[in-house]
Image: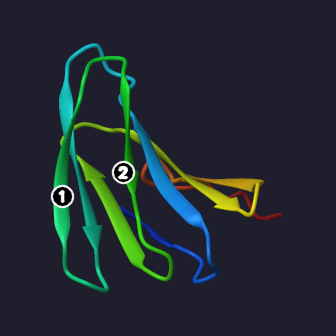
Amino acid sequence: VTPRFITVPAAPSISKLSIANPNAKATQATVTNLVSGTRSTVNIPGLGSTVVEVPAGSLVSVAGVQPVAASLVMDFDWQLAVLGLLDYQNLGGSVSVLVR
């Protein structure tokens, strides 16, 4: 599965990745901090989720053995922000264009 990347804002905050497994079978996801080089593998139960804390200012990649959904949840002094990690690609593999 193609990894997804996100840069965590450097502002003082509590930042966590919420990773959900939409599949009925358990799976694993790997969260890699590309700044520090640390890598952690998390087990996610079928139709379940897990949370991984990520440090401010880091560049993080998330890759699952099977497709997983991920969001970065940030708390800036009681102000919440949630950013979804999406894989922006054409799932069909090609785009047809009609020019007149």
Question: In this view of the protein, which residue sits in the foreground, 13 or 50?
Answer: 13
Disc 2 crowd, CA 10 A, few/some/many (<14, 14-19, 20+) = some
Q: Which residue is mark 2?
A: 52
Question: In this view of the protein, which residue sits in the foreground, 38 or 6?
Answer: 38
Left or right: residue 69 versus residue 41 is right
At 41% from the left and 64% from the top, the residue drawn is 54
Left or right: residue 19 versus residue 88 is left
At which x and y percent is residue 51? Answer: 39, 43
Left or right: residue 2 versus residue 77 is left
Whether 18 is drawn above or below 54: the answer is: above
Question: In this view of the protein, which residue sits in the foreground, 96 or 88?
Answer: 88
At 18% from the left and 66% from the top, the residue drawn is 39
As shown in the figure, which amino acid type bears the numbered disc 2? Val
Residue 38 placement: quadrant: bottom left
At 74% from the left and 63% from the top, the residue drawn is 77
Q: Which residue is mark 1?
A: 40
At which x and y percent is residue 19? Answer: 40, 41
